[in-house]
């Protein structure tokens, strides 16, 4: 992870709003960002993530789109979940549609939102983008706003 600069929560929220307006989970993820902001004392950093960083991001449980449970337990990594996503979704349903939607985006021009906890990166927003990045074999580094990074 390469640190670019410290940012304000207003900047984080503004980016989230621009990139996620219209998303069905917009209110939920904005709430997660606000909670993380409170937990880390408003300390946010803009970073560039390497492939290794992206693959090791810890994901929360995820089962709100389809009957299948994409991520049953917290702590599964992007690498593990992405390796099973085609089988779990059978490339149908809302989760797969959300992942497939990101197939052709320029990942160097979008952001994900994370929290650093005990030295590990944990997902706050951008799950389907992260999975698409792996499933569709992207190589771009990815920008992320991270709550609680210590330099």
Image (cartoon, rainbow, N blue to C red):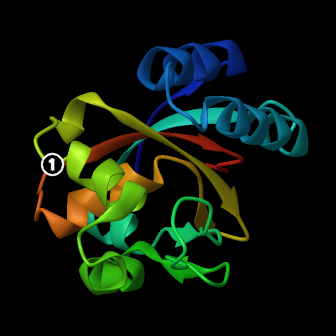
Residue 120: % across, % down: 61, 70
- Tag 1 residue: 103
Q: Nearer the viewer, residue 96 or 20?
A: 96
Q: Quadrant of the N terminus?
A: bottom left
Residue 4 quadrant: top left
Q: Residue at x 60, y 38 (%)?
A: 25
Q: Residue at x 24, y 43 (%)?
A: 101
Query: Is 57 located above or below residue 70 in the figure?
Result: above
Query: Is 95 located above or below residue 40 in the figure?
Result: below
Residue 119: % across, % down: 64, 69
| Res. 31 visible in picture | yes
Residue 65 quadrant: bottom right
For this view, does 81 lie left or right of residue 76? left
For this view, does 29 lie left or right of residue 79? right
Q: Residue at x 73, y 71 (%)?
A: 118
Q: Residue at x 50, y 19 (%)?
A: 21
| Mark 1 element type | loop
Query: Is 76 located above or below residue 112 in the figure?
Result: below
């Amino acid at each position: 992870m390469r640190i670019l600069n410290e940012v304000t929560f207003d900047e984080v929220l503004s980016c989230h709003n621009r990139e996620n307006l219209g998303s069905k989970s917009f209110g939920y993820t904005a709430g997660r960002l606000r909670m993380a902001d409170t937990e880390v004392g408003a300390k946010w950093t803009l970073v560039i993530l390497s492939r290794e960083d992206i693959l090791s991001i810890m994901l929360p449980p995820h089962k709100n789109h389809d009957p299948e449970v994409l991520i049953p337990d917290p702590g599964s990594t992007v690498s593990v979940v992405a390796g099973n996503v085609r089988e779990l979704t059978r490339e149908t349903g809302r989760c797969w549609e959300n992942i497939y939607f990101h197939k052709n985006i320029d990942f160097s021009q979008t952001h994900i939102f994370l929290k650093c906890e005990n030295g590990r990166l944990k997902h706050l927003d951008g799950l389907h983008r992260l999975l698409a990045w792996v499933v569709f074999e992207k190589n771009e580094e990815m920008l992320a706003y991270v709550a609680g990074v210590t330099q």
